[in-house]
Structure formats: C-alpha cells, structure tokens
Image (spheres, rainbow, N blue to C red):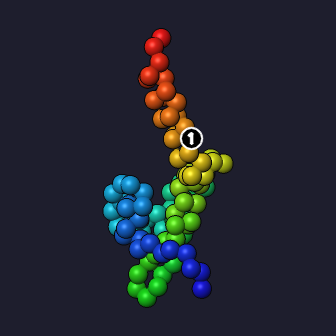
Amino acid sequence: MNKETRIPIGRIGEYLGCEVPLPTAHRWRLKGISHQGQRIRLPAIKIGSRFYVTESGLAEFIDKLNDSSETISDRQSTATDTMAADSILDGMEV
C-alpha cells in the first residue's frame, strides 16, 4: 500500500490555505471543474465510509487547473525570489 499522506476530504482547505466547504470538495471529486474544454476531477479514494485525497493528488489537481508546466513548489520559489528582490530594491535610493 502507498505510504503517501492521506488527507480527509473535508480538511483540504487547511492544505490550500483557504476554506473549502465539504460539499464543494465532493463536487470537485464527483463532477470536477470545467477548464478549457476538459473536466478536471479531484482524485480521491474511499476508505470505509470516508473519502481521502493524497498530497500529490491535490497538487496535481491544482496544477491542472492553473494550466501551467510549473509545479506548486516552482511558483513558491519564484515568489520567494521576487520578495527578496523587492526587499533589496526597497533599501536602494533612486
């Protein structure tokens, strides 16, 4: 069995940094989101009577919706580089 972390579907908002109501998470799982003519669904597994998503499945879902070849970690490092450059420019006089 895969040892990847399983996230209860009702708690994915904690990993995304925003509130995601349970009915919304289940809608993403069942119907997905229409994006550029494709239907993108949140991959989930059912264990007993509960649904779970994996960290990689959630990241893949978001990456597909962002329609980018960049991954989430690529965007985070770019944001960090931009903040560092901004702080350097703030210290310079023009």
Residue 36 visible in the picture: no
Q: Which residue lies furthest to the right in this view?
A: 69
Image x and y of residue 26, in percent: 42, 68
Task: Assign the N terminus to one quadrant of the image.
Answer: bottom right
- In the foreground, 15 or 23: 15
Q: How crowded is mark 1: few (under 14 residues within 10 Å), some or many (20 or more)?
A: few
Q: Residue furthest bottom?
A: 48
Q: Which residue lies furthest to the top in this view?
A: 94
Image x and y of residue 7, in percent: 44, 72
- In the foreground, 72 or 41: 72
Image x and y of residue 9, in percent: 41, 71
At 50% from the left and 74% from the top, the residue drawn is 5
Up the image or down, 54 lies above or below 82; here it is below
Up the image or down, 44 lies above or below 82; here it is below
Q: Is residue 41 left or right of residue 15?
A: right
- In the foreground, 3 or 94: 94
- In the foreground, 45 or 24: 45
Q: In which quarter of the image is residue 25?
A: bottom left
At 66% from the left and 48% from the top, the residue drawn is 69
Image x and y of residue 86, in percent: 48, 28
Q: In which quarter of the image is residue 51?
A: bottom left
Up the image or down, 10 lies above or below 33; here it is below
Up the image or down, 41 lies above or below 17; here it is below
Residue 79 visible in the picture: yes
Tag count: 1
- Please give the residue where the numbered disc 1 appears in the rendered image: 78
Q: What element carries label 1?
A: helix
Q: Is residue 86 left or right of residue 37?
A: left
Tell me which amino acid carries mark 1.
Thr
At 44% from the left and 22% from the top, the residue drawn is 91
